[in-house]
């Protein structure tokens, strides 16, 4: 589950999600992103809370759209598909080009740790 404030309305929303972990980071693959609007709140980095193990973790998240950022999307998607391999079949259009180009992911990082702003992850987990 994620909890966030709408970028325009300021209303607090909660949305159930499936996620994969990469160290302290949380990666969410947006299923059928063309039919969903919640992820658009994260086109720019924004705060959110992620419910993991019954505890709300304060995080910052931003949407990584594969067609716009294939180098950033590929390792995030790889991490997600390691956890949920069957999700690959839900990447619409993945038969024409790399699957990451068809993915929308929300990359969440802990707010409590000072870090550079969303550096590209490496395929080896960095």
Image (cartoon, helix red, strand yellow):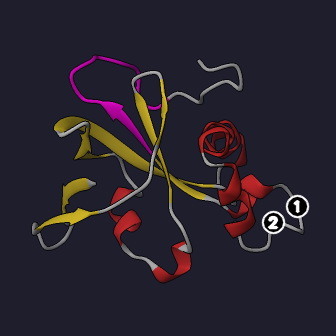
Determine whether, in the image, residue 3 is placed left or right of residue 38: left
Circle 1 is placed at which residue position? 97
Disc sitting over residue 109 in the figure: none
Q: Is residue 103 above or below residue 120?
A: below
**Toward which corner of the image does residue 76 lie, by quadrant?**
top right
**Secondary structure category for the residue under label 2:** loop
Rendered residue at 69%/40% (across/down): 78
Q: Which residue is mark 2?
A: 94
Residue occupying image coordinates x 39% and y 75%: 37
For residue 87, what is the image quadrant? bottom right
Q: Secondary structure at mark 1?
A: loop
Q: Is residue 114 magenta?
A: yes
Horizontal and vertical percent position of residue 100:
72, 53
Distance in Å between CA atoms under marks 2 and 1: 6 Å
Query: Residue shown at 62%/20% (left/top)?
Result: 125
Camera-side residue of 60 and 95: 95
Packing grade of label 2 (10 A; few <14, some 14-19, many >=20) is: some
Residue 119 higher or lower than 73, as above or below:
above
Question: Are the residues tagged 2 and 1 within 8 Å (C-beta)?
Answer: yes
Q: Which residues are magenta?
A: 107-118
């Amino acid at each position: 589950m994620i909890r966030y404030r709408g970028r325009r309305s300021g209303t607090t929303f909660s949305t159930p999600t499936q996620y994969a972990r990469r160290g302290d980071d949380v990666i969410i693959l947006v299923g059928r992103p063309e039919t969903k609007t919640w992820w658009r709140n994260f086109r720019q980095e924004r705060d959110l809370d992620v419910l993991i193990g019954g505890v709300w973790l304060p995080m910052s998240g931003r949407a990584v759209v594969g067609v716009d950022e294939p180098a950033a999307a590929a390792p995030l998607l790889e991490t997600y598909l390691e956890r949920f391999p069957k999700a690959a079949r839900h990447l619409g259009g993945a038969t024409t080009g790399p699957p990451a180009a068809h993915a929308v992911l929300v990359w969440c990082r802990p707010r409590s740790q000072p870090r550079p702003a969303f550096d590209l992850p490496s395929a080896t987990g960095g």
